[in-house]
Amino acid sequence: MEHKEHFHGSDLEKIEAAYGIKKEEIISFSANVNPLGLSYKVKDGLAKHIDCLTSYPDREYTRLRKTIATYVNSSFENICVGNGSSELIALFAKLCNPQSALIFGPTYSEYEHEIMLYGGKSSYFELKESDNFALDESALFDTLDAGDYDLLIICNPNNPTSALIGRESIDRIVSHCGKKNTLVMIDETYMEFVNDCENSTAIPLTDKYQNLVVLRGVSKFFASPGLRLGYAVTSNRSLSLGLKGIQVPWSVNSLAEVAGLLMFGDVKFIKDTKAYIEAERNRMYARLLHIPSLKVYKPTANFILCKILTSSVTAQDLFDEAIKEKLMIRDCASFTFLDESFFRFCFMKSDDDDKLMDVIERLFT
Ligand SMILES: Cc1ncc(COP(=O)(O)O)c(C=O)c1O
């Protein structure tokens, strides 16, 4: 088998073509989607509301925004909705058009891509492997003070490192940036998987700081990437009005609106997911720690990053071994600051996780 491409979690059709495996049979350890599947309430309720497709969604999305506000403990005026967090990332990139954005890296590549598309410029603040990708706050402040940044982007917890920056630290960063007129955008796509999500999320800080916007989406935690629903939380009215001003009307469709009304109140699904991911995260982390030829970074989200310590095996070799068993991991060579020795996978159903662990153990022990 030969391939030079690095597949994204949604590239199942490409995999199908490259490896001759039916996409329905592939278990994607690469998409970071909750293995419990759709919220019980959404599964039950969406079909009953299928006729919502015959009318436009509420242009202001008032009920949906109120539901999200309750879920994140904010006020509904602070909530903007979008067609996945991807649309919101793109809209903020367009709106801010930063001449100098600073992005914590390694991270999700879309921030840089969207900024570049709209003619802005960005550079990376490196989270060092030697620090296990933890933030060196004083080095950050030195960088911020030495430059003139109009936007700072943080993915928290970070994709692909699964490392978390605590709220106290985020508070100091946003405060520091406020004095320099720097807007801070925090992508919390994976925050709900964190054990102490309520005390880690930056959402409560959105009332304190005008230079803060927090993004989230339902693709990962609520296992609905096909729905395309994301939201932004900010108390900065000129920012939210600016966003609405450049957004296509009704960009969130009626089905996503209905699903949103159902899923955020599904307390059982939320509780089950948190308990399941915590147990699986602990179990897989403990198993990986036993493999001497891997360095494993302590995960806080629903996925884990590993570094291969032997030079004879690459992440692509692992990808090829795993895909033979229809298990698709993420080779991280395409991430800035990472190389072919890094791979990432998310926690799926226990049986499937065991199958992947067997492949990893076979290759590395
Ligand atoms: C960090 C991060 N942010 C945003 C997204 C895109 O999410 P959405 O489906 O809400 O557009 C992803 C998808 O992989 C992601 O990893």
Image (spheres, rainbow, N blue to C red):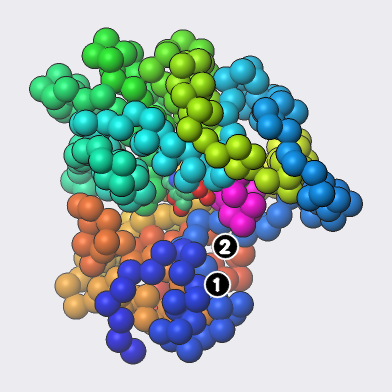
Residue 27: mark in rendering: 1
- State the residue in front, 297 or 145: 145
Q: Position of residue 364 (x, y in %)?
A: 32, 75
From what the image shows, is residue 171 above or below residue 292?
above
Residue 314: mark in rendering: none
Name the element at disc 1.
strand
- State the residue in front, 311 or 326: 326
Residue 348: mark in rendering: 2
From what the image shows, is residue 59 above or below residue 39?
above
Query: Residue lying farthest right?
Result: 48
Marks 1, 2: nearer the viewer? 1
Which kind of residue does numbered mark 1 sit on?
Answer: Ile
Q: Residues within 10 Å of mark 2 (few under 14, many from 20)?
A: many
Q: Quadrant of the N terminus?
A: bottom left
Q: Quadrant of the C terminus?
A: bottom left
Cβ of mark 2 under 8 A from ligand 1: no
Asked whether disc 1 touches disc 2, contact meaning CB atoms under 8 Å apart, the reply is yes
Identity of the residue drawn at 31% across and 41% down: 118
Q: Residues within 10 Å of mark 1 (few under 14, many from 20)?
A: many
Which kind of residue does numbered mark 2 sit on?
Answer: Met
Q: Which residues are magenta?
A: 219-230
Q: Is residue 229 left or right of 54 when viewed as pictured?
A: left
Identity of the residue drawn at 34% across and 45% down: 114
Q: Is residue 173 magenta?
A: no
Q: Position of residue 243 (x, y in %)?
A: 48, 28
Q: Is residue 228 magenta?
A: yes
Q: Is residue 47 left or right of 4 when viewed as pictured?
A: right
Mark 1 vs mark 2: which is more N-terminal? 1
